[in-house]
Image (cartoon, grey):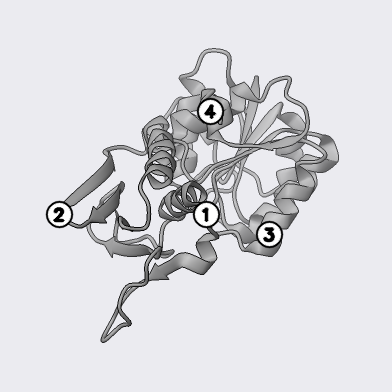
Amino acid sequence: MKIGILGSAGRMGQMLVRQVADTAGAELAGGTEAPGHASLGADIGLSAGLEAAGLTITDDASAVIAAADVAIEFSLPAATARHLELAAGSATPLVIGTTGHDAAQMGLIEAAAKQTAIVKAMNFSAGVNVLFALTERLAATLDEAFDIEIVEMHHKHKVDAPSGTAIGLGQAAAKGRGVDLDAKSVAGRDGISEQRRPGDIGFASLRGGDVVGEHSVIFAGAGERIELHHKAASRVIFAAGAVRAALWLEGKGPGLYDMFDVLGFGD
């Protein structure tokens, strides 16, 4: 399967290039970067610390998507719209690792999924997706006597908060409780805040050093507390999951899928 990498020169992009090169049944179709990027014109293999692949990094996403059996994008929310348009137009399956999409951008993803197969996930780690499933199950099992708090920590360069994974955990908790996350979400409690309302789902974000990603879901009751934790030691787990999702898309019809589908978790 030929896989195109949209956003191939960043840290995740380079890991994806290496992961594709190291995965049986997968080969590189090409890679893109934004116009003006310093890596444009460089060999995609050399850019990722591999031998030359004979493919140059380009800003022409249409050419890379056309050459690919499936494309993987880890870029910026604003770039996703163009990638969706191209993927839907050519019926090329797409794996979306970009996070931070607003409601309008999510609408574009859902519309494109009617024309091609798309896997979108807040996190491509198998372990984190187990954490999603456990969070939903515990939230469904424990009532509002147990307060839910989600704590995440990432490296000092991360600019969005809460992280996409933390939001995914909040969505899992809200689904388990049968509530709307937007109505129950509380992020940050600086100064004198109101007393915690029953059923709130709290978020706290920490930033520092080179932390790849740490997430905790805390169910705090009277006299007892249950905590779920996941710590990522390497971004390789995300690249491996994304490539796994790309290979899984072979032969899939149009639709919006997630890592539960890829991993076969079921409902």
Q: How far apart are marks 3 and 2 (CA)?
A: 43 Å
The front one of 59 and 43 is 59
Q: Which of marks 2 and 4 is nearer the N terminus?
A: 2
Question: Amino acid type of disc 2?
Answer: Gly
Q: What element carries label 3?
A: helix
Residue 38 disc label: 1
Q: Does the image show residue 48?
A: no
Q: Are marks 1 and 3 in contact (CB under 8 Å)?
A: no
Q: How far apart are marks 2 and 4 (CA)?
A: 44 Å
Tag 3 residue? 105
Q: Do the residues labelled 1 and 4 touch (CB within 8 Å)?
A: no
Tag 4 residue? 243
Q: Residue 8's image quarter?
A: top right
| Residue 205 drawn at (x, y percent) | 32, 63
Residue drawn 53% across the image and 57% down it: 179
Residue drawn 83% across the image and 36% down it: 90
Task: Rate crowding at label 3 as few (under 14), some (14 to 19) or many (20 or more) other CA atoms within 10 Å.
Answer: some
Side of 9 where 82 appears, left or right: right
Tag 2 residue? 223
Task: Rate crowding at label 2 as few (under 14), some (14 to 19) or many (20 or more) other CA atoms within 10 Å.
Answer: few
Task: Rate crowding at label 1 as few (under 14), some (14 to 19) or many (20 or more) other CA atoms within 10 Å.
Answer: few
Foreground tag (1 vs 3)? 3
Task: Rate crowding at label 4 as few (under 14), some (14 to 19) or many (20 or more) other CA atoms within 10 Å.
Answer: many
Q: Residue 220's image quarter?
A: bottom left
Residue 135 disc label: none
Side of 85 where 177 appears, left or right: left
Q: What element carries label 1?
A: loop
Q: Distance between the residues labelled 1 and 3?
A: 28 Å
Side of 54 where 10 appears, left or right: left
- Examine the rendered structure and indicate whether residue 32 appears above or below residue 101: above
Q: Residue furthest left?
A: 223
